[in-house]
Amino acid sequence: MSEVIALHPGVEPAESPLTPESWGKLGMWIFLAADAMSFGALLSGYGALRFGSGDWPVPSHVLGVGLTAFMTFLLISSSVTMVLALAAIQRGDMTGLRKFLALTVLGGLMFLGMQAYEWTHLIERGLTLSGNPFGAALFGTTFFIITGFHGAHVTGGVVYLSCYLIRSLLGRLKPDHANQIEIAALYWHFVDLVWILVFTFVYLL
Amino acid sequence: MAETHKQPNYIGVFWWLLILTVVEVAVIFMPMARFLIAILLVGLALSKAFLVAMYFMHLKFERTTLGLIAVTPLLLCVLLVFALLPDHSATPHLTGASPATAAAPSSQ
């Protein structure tokens, strides 16, 4: 025991065991795994409520699948601009980084705008957190909670990426900050990945 | 260390995601059994999630142990779905009998 302590004095290992680039990246992955469980719990709960209910409406009859398919396209596109932003900073191209980061933020903002439009229309037609003229009231509850929780994640992502966009516009972001952009990109792709699942389970299935 | 892997074809992944999305939307309008549509949709959604994780999140180029962290929530969610199954079958809507009529014969 004393030998072990002697061999390893109170110094932390310099390199993260799973992600050699940085500890922050490992931290983000662990956070995302935990966050995935939040969505997993919401979607499993959705399944239990739906199959336990007799008058659950067919989602595509109530919700606008065309609009949300376009929203899916938007998020996928913003994921592509995000990987291009990361590729740009990794080769030291700060103009490319600003361009693609701005496009990613724009994609996120458009997504949120369309979600606000969708919600407004559904609320006008009577679908609320506690009421649904098309069948089971829990349809409205689960719809707004799941899409709202995801929308909050998109909002967080837009703020997160905007901070880096502002920093790069002020010239405070250097090519050696690529790892920070990579960590932010992980979060953004996760939000895209979750939307793919939400779109399938809440809108299509 | 950070820049050892070759960049994947991001635009190619984008086209795949787009095609799979179009197929998903088309599937719900196909004249097929409901469970078949459900299986197809879950398969398509998981393929898309897999593409995003592997290429956009670079999981393909990371150490395997990191992949285990990423897969853990998926396994836990599958467990959670099975844990919730008794709740589905316990609900009276599925059997068509209300709790009152179901309880009546046993009391006599």
Image (spheres, grey):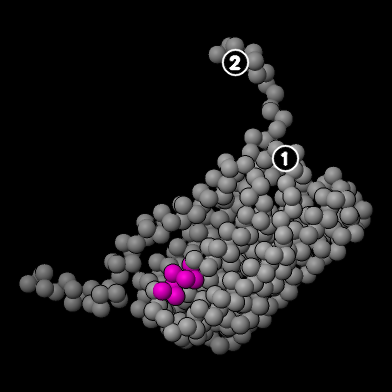
In screen coordinates, is A93 left or right of B32? right
> Which residue corresponds to the image point at 70% horizontal and 72% vertical from the top-left?
A74
**Residue nearest the observer in this picture, B49 or A23:** B49
| Residue at 55%, 78% in the rendered image | B25
- Amino acid, disc 2: Val
Residue B73: percent from the left, percent from the top? 51, 52
Which residue is nearer to you in this view: A89 or B19? B19
Where residue A17 appears, as percent x and y from the top left, is 64, 35
**Disc 2 target residue:** A4
Same chain for mark 1 and mark 2? The answer is yes
Residue kind at label 1, given as amino acid type:
Ser
Would you call the spot at circle 1 few (<14 residues within 10 Å), some (14-19), or many (20 or more)? some
Magenta stretch, residue numbers: B36-42
Residue A32, given in percent of the width and then of the height, sits at 61, 52
- The total number of labels drawn is 2
Instruction: Specify the quadrant that holds the C terminus of chain B.
Output: bottom left
Specify the label residue A99 is tagged with. none
The rendered magenta stretch, by its main secondary structure, is classed as: helix
